[in-house]
Image (cartoon, rainbow, N blue to C red):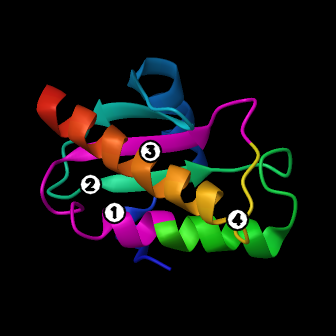
Amino acid sequence: MIAKRYRLREREIKKVLRSGKPFFSSVLRADVRPNRLHHARFALILSAKHVAWSVQRNFFRRRFYAAMASVRDARWLDIVVRAKKWVKLDRRSAVSREQFDASIATLLSAIFSAF
C-alpha cells in the first residue's frame, strides 16, 4: 500500500483519462498529466476481465506500486495505468509477471523521456 498523498481519487483519474497524454507498451497503457504538486500520483486499473481473482489483482497492484516508489518524488505527474483489452494476467505465470514488469519499465522510460 502506498501513502494516500501518492494515490489518485476517482475524479482525478477521470480527468487524467480524459485529457492525459497516452503512452503504450505491449501489455499496458498509461495516461499522464502534469500536476502542480511536488510529487507524482498514481493509479492502476485492473478489472476482473484482466485478472480473475482479487488476490491476483492485489498482487499486481502491489508490484506496480513498488515499481513506482522509486519515481514518485522525481516528477510531478499524475499517472493512470491500465491493462489493454486483450490482456490476461496471472501471478502464477512467470511470463505474465515478466511482461508486466517489462511493460512498467517501458512505460516509465517513455514517460520520463517525454516530460
Residue located at (22% from left, 41% from top): 109
User: For this rendering, which residue is in front, 20 or 60?
Assistant: 60
Judged left or right of residue 41, residue 26 is right
The reply to whether callout 2 and callout 1 are in contact (CB within 8 Å) is yes
Residue 49 falls within the magenta-colored stretch: no
Q: CA distance from mark 4 to mark 2?
A: 30 Å
Distance from the alpha carbon under mark 4 to that under mark 3:
16 Å
Task: Quarter of the image for the C terminus: give it.
Answer: top left
Q: CA distance from mark 2 to mark 1?
A: 9 Å
Cα–Cα span, label 1 and label 4:
22 Å
Q: Which residue is mark 4?
A: 93
User: Tag 1's secondary structure?
Assistant: helix
Q: Considering the numbered disc 3 on the image, is that residue within a helix, a strand or a loop?
A: helix
Can residue 9 be seen here? The reply is no
In the structure shown, which secondary structural element does the residue marked by tag 2 occupy?
loop
Q: Residues within 10 Å of mark 4 (few under 14, many from 20)?
A: few
Q: Which residues are magenta?
A: 64-87
**Tag 3 residue:** 103
* Amino acid type at mark 3: Ser
Between the residue at mark 3 and the residue at mark 1, the CA separation in whole angstroms equals 13 Å
Q: Earlier in the sequence, mark 2 or mark 1?
A: 2
**Which residue matches tag 2?**
40
- Circle nearer the viewer, 1 or 4: 4
**Quadrant hosting residue 66:** bottom left
Choose the circle earlier in sequence order: 3 or 1.
1
Rendering coords of residue 47 (x, y %): 78, 49
- Location of mark 1 (residue): 68
Give, as a three-letter code, the residue at label 4.
Answer: Ser
Say which of marks 3 and 1 sits in front. Answer: 3
Residue 72 lies in the magenta stretch: yes
Task: Name the foreground residue: 111 vs 26.
Answer: 26
